[in-house]
């Protein structure tokens, strides 16, 4: 990764504009849980209360300075690539959608090369998958390199999501998958062969449609 500095995590969190919002949101969620149990709210009522708090938190996040928020997220990722902690990463990574930037993808690829933390890799793949093509497409060669060997920390669900991402991004994904069909990783081999079967089924369906229309 290029131009990543070393940051003091305590100083970073002290100066962060997002961290106080995360702490406030977590406090509010604790209070909501207490209220739900005290008032014995049913599932629908709980969904409504938690939903209102989520909207309130996101509205506050959207008021942050965009340039500073982008820098904070990049700093956060840099710190946690080193520490492996990834505390509250689900709140931090949401900045990717709220404050889009082409600078994120390099850091997300670094995350995919790192040790896993819960569903961290799954969400890194998700954010790459839904980035604008002009941002993600230039990174396709680097993303393909992750296929061999597959990061052993990835869960089966993350492996599945990774190959789905490649299928969405690459018009020639089938040719690439053919080179990997005998992967030593059982999960990778399974999902690759499922995609190859899908491509073959689609071809047969197209052939049948052509016969029907002639």
Image (cartoon, rainbow, N blue to C red):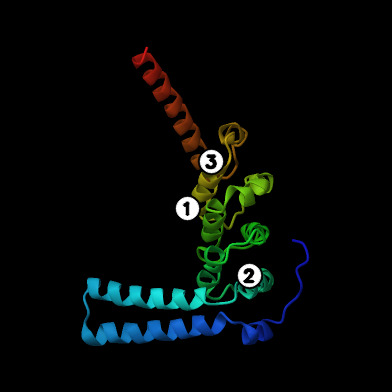
Q: Is disc 2 placed on a helix, strand or loop?
A: helix
Per the image, the residue denoted by label 3 is 167
Label 1 or label 3, whichever lies nearer to me, is: 3
Q: Which residue is drawn at 67% across and 47% down?
A: 138
Label 2 or label 3, whichever lies nearer to me, is: 2
Distance Cα–Cα, label 2 vs label 1: 29 Å
User: Please, which residue is most extreme toward the top here?
Assistant: 214
User: Label 1 near label 2: C-beta < 8 Å?
Assistant: no
Distance Cα–Cα, label 2 vs label 3: 29 Å
Q: In the drawing, does residue 15 fall left or right of residue 88?
A: right
Q: Name the mark on residue 25.
A: none
Residue 141 vertical position relative to residue 97 in the rendered view, above or below:
above
User: Label 3 near label 1: C-beta < 8 Å?
Assistant: no
Residue 65 appears in the figure: yes
Per the image, the residue denoted by label 1 is 157
* x and y percentages locating residue 131 in the rendered image: 56, 54
* x and y percentages locating residue 173 in the rendered image: 57, 36
* x and y percentages locating residue 178 in the rendered image: 59, 32
Q: Is disc 1 placed on a helix, strand or loop?
A: helix
Residue 171 vertical position relative to residue 115 in the rendered view, above or below:
above
Q: Name the mark on residue 70.
A: 2
Distance Cα–Cα, label 1 vs label 3: 15 Å
């Amino acid at each position: 990764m290029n131009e990543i500095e070393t940051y003091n995590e305590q100083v970073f969190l002290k100066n962060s504009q997002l961290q106080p919002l995360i702490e406030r949101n977590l406090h509010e969620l604790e209070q909501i849980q207490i209220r739900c149990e005290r008032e014995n709210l049913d599932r629908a009522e709980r969904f409504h209360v938690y939903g209102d708090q989520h909207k309130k938190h996101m509205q506050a996040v959207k008021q942050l300075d965009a340039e500073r928020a982008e820098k904070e997220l990049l700093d956060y990722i840099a710190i946690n690539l080193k520490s492996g902690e990834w505390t509250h990463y689900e709140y931090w990574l949401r900045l990717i959608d709220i404050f889009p930037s082409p600078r994120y993808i390099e850091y997300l690829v670094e995350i995919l090369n790192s040790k896993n933390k819960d569903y961290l890799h799954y969400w890194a793949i998700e954010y790459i998958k839904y980035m604008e093509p002009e941002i993600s497409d230039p990174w396709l060669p680097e993303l393909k390199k992750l296929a061999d060997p597959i990061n052993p920390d990835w869960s089966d669900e993350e492996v599945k999501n990774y190959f789905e991402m490649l299928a969405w991004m690459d018009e020639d994904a089938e040719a690439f998958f053919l080179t990997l069909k005998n992967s030593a990783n059982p999960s990778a081999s399974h999902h690759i062969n499922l995609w190859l079967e899908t491509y073959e089924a689609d071809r047969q369906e197209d052939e049948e449609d052509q016969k029907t229309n002639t």
